Amino acid sequence: MAATPEADWVSRFADEVIAEAERRAPGKPIVCASGLSPSGPIHLGNLREVMTPHLVADEIRRRGHEVVHIISWDDYDRYRKVPAGIDPSWAEHIGKPLTSVPAPPGSAYPNWAEHYKAAMIESLAQLGVAYRGISQTQMYTSGAYREQILLAMRERAKIDAVLDRYRTKGRTASGAPQQGKLDEEEAAAAQEAAEGSGAASEDDGTGAAGYYPYKPYCSVCERDLTTVVAYDDDTTELTYTCQCGHGETVRLSEHDRGKLVWKVDWPMRWAYEGVVFEPSGVDHSSPGSSFQVGGQLVGEIFGGQQPIGPMYAFVGISGMAKMSSSRGGVPTPGDALQIMEPPLLRWLYARRRPNQAFKIAFDQEIQRLYDEWDTLGRKVVEGTANAADAAAYSRAVGTAAGPLPTTPHPLPYRTLASIVDITTGDPQQTLRILRDLDPADPVASLDETRPRLDRAQHWITTQVPADQRTRVLTEPDTTLLAKLDDTERESLRLLLAGLDDHWSLEGLTTLVYGVPKQRLGLPMDVKPTPELKVAQREFFALLYHLLVGRDTGPRLPTLLLAVGPAQARTLLTP
C-alpha cells in the first residue's frame, strides 16, 4: 500500500509493515515487538523502544488488521552492576538472572526484575499501550526454547563464522562501537544504553575451549561466571566450570538454567515469534552490532527473517544529563506522568520521526510545551491543523480501543502552575482564583481541572527550586512606596482604579498592558512601539517588586487574581 504524500511517519511504517506481513505470512496476526531489560529504572529513552512499535501497531489495528505488540521482558539477563543508592552488598548477586536477585530494600515485589517491571507496567496502562508481555525467564526455564538452543549448538561453527565477520569491524581503538555522526552527548548515551541492555560488552560465546553460543547459570552459585569446556552433539551433554569452583556435566536436552548469548538470542526470538516490525536504538545499529549480526543469523541459522524497523534516536531531558538506566535518579515514564497528562507524553513520541532526537521537559519548558499542545488541540477542532500534526494529535489522545481520559476543563498549564505556586496548593484559595479566571465560563469544582491541575501542582512542588517559588508579600514595602516618582504613582493609581471593572484573567491582561498606554496618552489598541515596550517592562518590574519582592514572577494577571483585590490594594497603594 502506497503512503499518501501527507501521511505521517506512523502511517508510512504501517503501510510497509502490512505489505511485508502479507508477503511473509498472509492471513496471520502481524507481530510488532519491543524488548525491555528491568535491570534498573526503565527510563524515558527506553520508552521509545515501546512507543514506536505501539503507535505503528495501533495504526494497523485501526485499519482492521489483527496485530499483536509483544514486549519481551529481558528478565533472564544477568545482573550487571549495583546501581547508585543500593546497598553495596548486592554485589554478591552480580551474574545472577535478574529474577534471582532480591528486590531493592523495602520493595513489595519478589525479585529485582519484578520490582522494576511493575512501575513500567503501571505507566504503560496509563499511556493506553496494549501489549502481550513475555518473560524471558519463563521462556527459558520452561524449555520453550529448547529446540532453538540445541539448533544453535549444532550450528555453532556457522554462528562463530558469522560473528567473526564482524569482530574486527566497526570498532574504535578502545573497542567501543563506532557512533557515526552522533554528538558527544549521544555517543556517551549510546555507551550507557548498551550497558543496560543485553547488547553491551556481552560475552559472544568465544572461549579457550571453542565457541559455544549457550551460557549456563551455575547450579550452585546461580551466576553466569561459567565456561563451557565441552559439548557432545549426539548426547547433548554439556560440561561447564564456574569461577565459584563448581563444575558439572548436564544434558542440554533437559537443562533449563541458561540462555543463548545476546547476539544469538535476539535473532532466535525474531524467528520464534515471527516478528515483522521492531525498531532498534543507535547502540544496536553500528557496524558489528547485535542488530546487524542478528540479520545474518536469523536466516542462516534459524530460518527466519529480520524485522523491518527504524533506528531510533535518543530522548533527553531538558536541563539534565543524558539518561542512563545504570545510574540513579533517571527520569522514568512514571516520573513524567506525574507532571504531564498521558496524551501529552504520547504526543512527544508520536510527533517526531523515530530517527529524530528530542527532549522531554522537566523544567520551565513544560509550560511552553503545554501551550503548544493546547494550540494544536484548538487547530484540530477548527480544522486548520496540517495532516501530519492532526494525525499525531489523534494518536496522542486515543488508541484503537478508544480515547484516553482527559481534563474536562483544561486551563493553561502555566496558569495552573502559577496559581498552585502562589496558593501553595490550598484548595479553597485555588478554587477562588480559578472561578475568577473567566466569569463567562467559571470553574465550578477543582475536579473539572483534574488531572492537569494535579500535574501542575506536582511540577511546582518537585521541579521548581525553593528560591524560585512565588511568595506574595504579607506587608507593603513602605520603603519602596515612599520612593515612587510621579509617573509610578500615576501608573499604580490607574491600575487600582481599574481593578473592579477588569477582574478576570482577560480583563486584567488588558489592564496591566493598558496602563502604560494610558499614561503615554496612547489608544488601547495601539501596536507596541519601542517606547511603549520600555514603559511596560518598567511598570511590570515595579508591580513584581511590590507584590513578591523580586524583578519577575508569574504572569501578572494570574498573580493579581491570586493576590485578590483587597491584598492588591494593600500592597500597591502608595
Image (tube, rainbow, N blue to C red):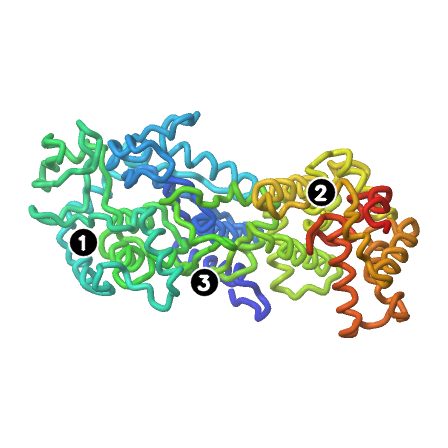
Helix, strand or loop for disc 1 = helix
Helix, strand or loop for disc 2 = helix
Helix, strand or loop for disc 3 = loop
- Residue denoted by label 2: 422
Front label number (3 vs 1) = 3
> Dot 3 surroundings within 10 Å: few (below 14), some, or many (20 or more)?
few
Reading the chain from its start, which is encountered first: label 3 or label 1?
Answer: 1
Q: Residue at x 53, y 61 (%)?
A: 352
Q: Is residue 356 left or right of residue 411?
A: left
> Dot 2 surroundings within 10 Å: few (below 14), some, or many (20 or more)?
many
Residue 226 lies, in percent from the top left, at: 15, 38
Q: Is residue 328 left or right of residue 471?
A: left
- Residue denoted by label 3: 355
Q: Which mark is residue 159?
A: 1
Q: Residue at x 83, y 46 (%)?
A: 568
Q: Residue at x 42, y 60 (%)?
A: 310
Q: Residue at x 52, y 67 (%)?
A: 2
User: Residue flagged by tag 2: what amino acid is it?
Assistant: Ile
Disc 2 + disc 3, Cβ < 8 Å: no
User: Residue flagged by tag 1: what amino acid is it?
Assistant: Ile
Residue 225 lies, in percent from the top left, at: 17, 38
Q: Is residue 498 left or right of residue 181?
A: right
Disc 3 + disc 1, Cβ < 8 Å: no
Disc 1 + disc 2, Cβ < 8 Å: no
Front label number (1 vs 2) = 2
User: Residue flagged by tag 3: what amino acid is it?
Assistant: Asn
Disc 3 from disc 1: Cα separation: 30 Å
